[in-house]
Amino acid sequence: MIICNIRSRVLVLILVMVTLISISFANAVLAEKAYLSVDPLGTKTIGDLVILSGETNLPEGTKLSVRVEEAEYNSGTVVVKGSNNINWWFVPVDTWGIKPGTYIVNATEIKGYNLNKTGYLYGNAQGNTTFILNGTFLGSEISVPARGQEHAFIALDSIPDKKTGDLFLITGKTNLSVGTDIIWEIRPTILDSDVEITNNPNLSGIMANSQVTRGSDTNRVSLALNTYELNPDEYNVSVATVKGDIFSPDMVFGTVTDYDIFTLK
């Protein structure tokens, strides 16, 4: 929020003129049509970390919904500050579990929630593009339950410290079957400590789901992380199997799990 204070009344006429000019300029900005673009992508290969991005004149912090249609990939993101009145948005996409094909990317402004808070209200600003994904499908056509898999493990790869704005893959190895549902949680480590939280700190975190995919020598787990959605902090990244339907309110974390800690600066 920008707060303007008039410091003196030396020239009343000039102040009135400046005020009128300011009001006219503000009305012109409000009347400017909101736009949202999606950058071209071309052809990608399964296993690539695909970075979706685009320009917009929507304000910094505006929430967006970004979907890769037919790939069951849906992500939220926020507008980040750019320059010359042009802002940006970014979404990283982990393609390990996506089938080869041609895909449409849709980005849409989120205005808020509906009255029952069961869904979003969308704005008029939207953009789209297409891209081709080549390669061999490394996922599963069906969701596989974790039960019955003896001696199962997940071992996350070490995560180095990151800077705000980094877009990267969290990866790990597992002997769980391809298609096994897993749940991810990225949360500040202070929430897992005995430190008392006071003064309403600005904490942030993410929960997401994915499936086990096929690797070169063993199966793998991975998650594309967009650090624009997180505040600088120390984070605990945990991954676990799921008990019950992953989309059910009764879903709980399973016993096959691992975690790692990194600092976002």
Image (spheres, rainbow, N blue to C red):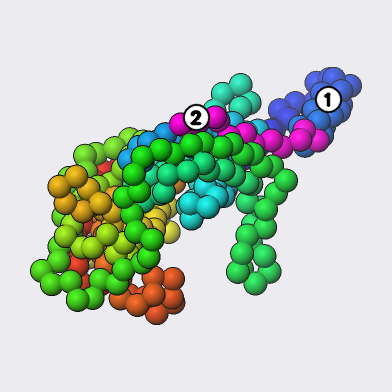
What is the span of residues highlighted in magenta in the rendered image? 31-43
Residue 21 is tagged as: 1
Mark nearer the viewer, 1 or 2: 2
Q: Are marks 1 and 2 in contact (CB under 8 Å)?
A: no
* Residue 139 in the figure: left or right of residue 50: left
Q: Residue 36 location in percent, x, y?
A: 64, 36
> Gap between marks 1 and 2, in whole Å?
45 Å
45 shown above or below 209: above
Precedes in sequence: disc 1 or disc 2? 1
Q: Which of 207 and 153 is in front in this view?
A: 153
Q: Which residue is drawn at 50% across and 31% down?
A: 41
Please identify the quarter of the rendering in which residue 31 is found. top right
Residue 42 is tagged as: 2
Q: Residue lying farthest right?
A: 13
14 shown above or below 244: above
Q: For numbered disc 2, what is the local secondary structure? A: strand
State whether the magenta stretch is mostly helix, strand or loop.
loop
The reply to whether the magenta stretch includes residue 190 is no
Whether residue 41 is visible: yes
Q: Which residue is drawn at 22% across and 48% down?
A: 215
